[in-house]
Amino acid sequence: MRPFTALLLLFTLITATPLAAAPPSSDWQESISQLHPGDHIRLSLKTGPVDGPFVSSTPQDITVGSVTTPKDAVLKIQRYSVAHGHATRHRVRNAAIGAAIGFGVGYGIGAAATHCSHSGQLLCGGTFSNDFGLIFGGGGLLVGAAVGALLPQGHGKETLYSLK
């Protein structure tokens, strides 16, 4: 497979993969039904943020820690990701994307390094060019997977409810 074709295939696979989460809901009941007692959440209120464990909710209000807030004062509800759940899936996804990009780049560099501009060069085309591409691609795969897995995971909050 030619390096350009491999890169085009890689680009198509990456861009076709849905990476964005569903947009936050503006439906109060739908949003609070996703919460479980003990979930660590952040309420963005008109007076400022409130962080803490979710306790309970009604159609009129929500209780976080020892603070009960009326629905009308809540601008946004965000749930912090569980360390071993969402973060692990994101690390695996990032590692896979990094590995694919690393392989494509490494293969392209390896194949290009053996390209001949003059006849009679020692490293010149054919299967040797493909072998060099695979060797560099394998190295790129390992480096890309490591970099992808080590990328910072961000703040790890999922927006469940938003008035905006």
Image (cartoon, grey):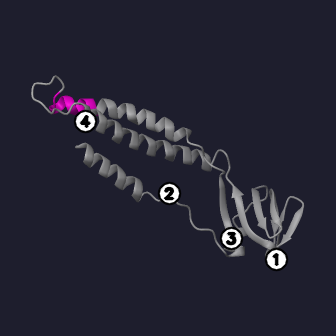
**Quick one: label 1 or label 4, which is nearer the N terminus?**
1
Q: Which residue is drawn at 72% across and 68% down?
A: 76
Q: Name the residue under label 1.
A: 60
Q: Name the residue under label 3.
A: 162
Q: Which residue is drawn at 43% across and 57% down?
A: 17
Residue at the limit of the structure toward the left, as seen here? 119
Identify residue type, mark 4. Ala
**Quick one: label 3 or label 2, which is nearer the N terminus?**
2
Q: Is mark 3 on a helix, strand or loop?
A: strand
Q: Residue at x 50, y 37 (%)?
A: 147
Let me know if residue 125 is in the magenta part: yes
Q: Name the residue under label 4.
A: 112
Viewed as shown, does residue 109 lie left or right of 51? Answer: left
> Where are the magenta residues, as a range?
124-133
**Residue 49: x %, y % from top left:** 80, 62
- Quadrant position of residue 115: top left
**Cα separation between marks 4 and 2:** 32 Å
**Residue 130: x %, y % from top left:** 22, 33
Within 10 Å of disc 2 (Cα), the crowding (few <14, some 14-19, many 20+) is few
**Quick one: label 4 or label 3, which is nearer the N terminus?**
4
Within 10 Å of disc 3 (Cα), the crowding (few <14, some 14-19, many 20+) is some
Q: In this view, does 8 lie above or below 109?
A: below
Q: Is mark 2 on a helix, strand or loop?
A: loop
Label disc, if present, on residue 19 of the rendered structure:
2
**Cα separation between marks 1 and 2:** 34 Å
- Classify the position of the N terminus by image quarter: top left
**Cα separation between marks 3 and 2:** 20 Å
Identify residue type, mark 3. Ser
In front of the other: label 4 or label 3?
4
**Residue 106: x %, y % from top left:** 34, 36
Identify residue type, mark 2. Leu
In front of the other: label 1 or label 4?
4
